[in-house]
Image (cartoon, grey):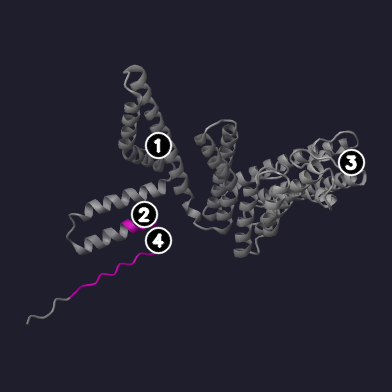
Amino acid sequence: MLVLAVLDVPLARLAHQSLNASGGSTPFWFSAALGAVGFVVASRSPRNPLGWILLATATFSVLSEDASFYLVADYRLRHGGLPLGWVAVLAQPGWAATIVLIGLVVLLFPDGRPPSPRWRWVLWLYLAAATLYLVGVLIASVGAIAGHDIRVDASGNLLALSDPTGSSAWWGVVETVFLSLLLVCWAGSVAGQAASYRRSSGERRQQLKWLLAGSAIAGVGIPVAVLLSGTHGILAGLAGGIAGGCGQLGIPVCMGVAILRYRLFDIDRLVSRTIGYAIVTGLLVGVYAGIVLLATRVVSINEPVAVAGSTLAVAALFNPVRRRVQRAVDRRFNRTRYDADQTVAAFATRLKDAVDLDGVRDDLAGVVNQALEPAHVSVWITRHELPPPG
């Protein structure tokens, strides 16, 4: 996979395209994220098939990117003058294998098995349809090579697959049937995961929360990036790049955390902090814009003065607003942490006036038990003896 990723650079130059311009496959950075997560999961948990599936997904994705660049360079810029163009024709539909494997990851998350034994028939139905889909891709590609009808679009896609007409019209029917079945299987898997979430507790519940968090990040980040892609300006471009990067990395990273159970129980804190800062940002942006409009349009203050005053006002409001909003969000989304913080704060207040050592010890043990819920609590107290006189 690393070799194929490195080959992306010279092949992109050969096709006179940027590294992330290949529309014939998934973006390069998404493939890199999948590969990194797959490598970590496969090395840490080799018995979990999801790590190997993620690695295979990234490999097919990068292979498809390489082939897309090569097809553009060969059949659009040099009119078939480069060698081994037929190999690239067979390799470019690696995006089909990528789609199949991503669907398999969704069906088998997080331990490589269906959500319940009753969903095994969904898995077998999906594998059967995926096999027919991949065989159809291979037949269409081989048919284009045998018929010397290799035509590609600007993204490197074989037109027999991306725009099937004439003798390739059958492929359009196969693709429509498979994608429809894919959506049905995904919906069934999501329903199974949702039912499992309602019944689950502990680690399983936290794993599903991470998957939902990654899906939410992707569901917000990618549409925002698409909307900002048509706008002009440095800030809009930067915001679109950040949103797109977060959207592409959200699902792979969250899946990796959930599968490896690394910092698994931090999801509640992550969600509460994300929601809290999003609300704070929206409020402060609204305050800033309101003050600027009020000062410039109503009071007729000079724009530099209005901007400076608005900036100072927002800076002064940041910490008070953040504390109030975060307290309200924690109370709703991170209740355990909120209760623990309140308990510790109350203990600190009582500790200021405490003089009885036994009372402090008992109070401390009660606070630790309530806030952290440990299996047991032990308190060691060291008594320093005064040295003998003289």
Residue occupying image coordinates x 58% and y 55%: 256
Q: Which residue is mark 4?
A: 374
Q: Marks 2 and 1, Cα distance to the nearest angstrom?
A: 27 Å
Residue at the extreme bottom of the image, as rendered: 390
Within 10 Å of disc 3 (Cα), the crowding (few <14, some 14-19, many 20+) is few
Which residue carries the number 2 mark?
371
Q: Earlier in the sequence, mark 3 or mark 4?
A: 3
Q: Nearer the viewer, mark 3 or mark 2?
A: 3
Q: CA distance from mark 3 to mark 1?
A: 57 Å
Few, some or many residues within 10 Å of mark 4 (<14, 14–19, 20+)? few
Question: In the rendered structure, which disc, 4 or 1, sits on the residue that comes first in sequence?
Answer: 1
Q: Nearer the viewer, mark 2 or mark 1?
A: 1
Q: Which residue is mark 3?
A: 149
The image shows residue 303, relative to residue 139, as above or below, that is above
Mark 3, mark 1: which one is toward the viewer? 3
Q: What secondary structure is marked by label 1?
A: helix
Residue appearing at x 27%, y 58% in the figure = 363
Label placed on residue 280: 1
**In the rendered structure, which segment of residues is drawn in magenta?**
367-384
Q: Amino acid at mark 1?
A: Val
Residue 119 in sight from this viewpoint:
no
| Viewer-nearest residue: 179 or 125 | 179
Pick whichever of labels 3 and 2 is earlier in the sequence.
3
Disc number lying in front (3 or 4) = 3
- Would you say 60 lies left or right of 356 here? right
Q: Secondary structure at mark 2?
A: helix
Foreground residue among 101 and 67: 67
Type of residue at label 3?
Answer: Asp
Q: Quadrant of the C terminus?
A: bottom left
Q: Is residue 151 left or right of residue 332?
A: right
